[in-house]
Image (tube, grey):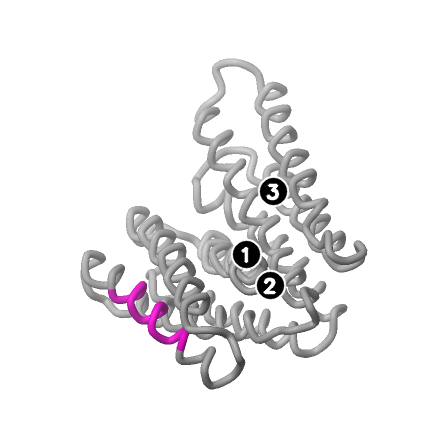
Amino acid sequence: MKPWTIGTIGLAGLAVFIGGAYTSPEVLLGVAVAVALAVGIGWPHFLGIPAKKTLAAIIGLPGVGAAVAATYVPAPGFLDWTPAFIAAGVMAVFLMQLLRGTGQAQRLESTLGSSAGVLLSCLGAGWIAASRFNGVKEMLLVAGISAAFALLAGLIRWPDRIVAPLGIVLAGLTAPLAGLIFSNIAVIPAAVVGIVVGAVLVSLRRLVILRGDRIDFPAAFGMGLAPVAAVGSLAYFIDKLLIY
């Protein structure tokens, strides 16, 4: 599938996350769970590694657990359980590789790539944490708008040496503007959010380009949603460090 298709999936996932944040905690939890499972299913397909069904469960279920914990744990420890779920997922990846035995194909790629998938799956809980943090959702909106512009830049069929800086610049400029229009967030924290979010999204776009067009639908679906899942955690931690 083409990179622009994956970018379109990312934009749709971004809209669903923002809509869930402004609807109800239960809806946002459902969105985070669905995205975690989608990342779990799609990530092994994107990596092209064996044992895709088993790895889908190992990657997706920690993200589900992190999302449920972020929804129901008392404030302010919204993500206190997330490292535990990440660790459990990574240990499950290593255990699975041990059970596969020696001499199996792509053991190193499977171990490292699946561990990264566990991390991305669990980062989706950051959307819930950012939504619950102080009961203020403006940072999510600012991060979402900047991410949307970075994803839109990624849809342009130009060389990556042009699109990558363009995506970061657009995200860095639109975030402060969105902060001024929709919230009272200061310019500098909003700009930091935009630049960081833009850098993450264009970096993962580069991974898609390196794979070429040899991506099936599960891989495209998971890869389109994985960077969007990370945006919520970025917004939460920057909000907590620079604003609160």
Q: Mark 1 touching mark 2, by CB under 8 A?
A: yes
- Mark sitting on residue 241: 1
> What residue is pinned by disc 2?
244
Give coordinates of residue 136: x percent, y percent: 65, 73
Q: Earlier in the sequence, mark 1 or mark 3?
A: 3
* The one of 163 and 234 positioned closer to us in this rendering: 234
Q: Residues within 10 Å of mark 1 (few under 14, many from 20)?
A: few
As helix, strand or loop, the secondary structure at mark 3 comes to helix
**The N terminus appears in which quarter of the rendering?**
bottom left
Task: Write the residue at 34% across / 48% down.
Answer: 207
Magenta stretch: helix, strand or loop mostly: helix
Residue 163's quadrant in the figure?
Answer: bottom left
Q: Mark 1 touching mark 3, by CB under 8 A?
A: no
Looking at this rendering, what residue extends furthest in the top direction?
A: 102
Spatial CA distance of label 1 from label 3 is 28 Å
Q: Which residues are magenta?
A: 166-176
Looking at the picture, which amino acid does disc 1 mark? Leu
- Mark sitting on residue 59: 3
Is 175 within the magenta?
A: yes
Residue 89's quadrant in the figure?
Answer: top right
Q: Is residue 80 left or right of 216 when viewed as pictured? A: right
Q: Earlier in the sequence, mark 3 or mark 2?
A: 3
Give coordinates of residue 3: x percent, y percent: 34, 61
| Vertical side of 66 occupied by 130: above or below | below
Is 26 within the magenta?
A: no
| Vertical side of 88 occupied by 45: above or below | below
**The C terminus appears in which quarter of the rendering?**
bottom right
Looking at the picture, which amino acid does disc 3 mark? Ile
* The one of 45 and 79 positioned closer to us in this rendering: 79
Give coordinates of residue 168: x percent, y percent: 31, 63
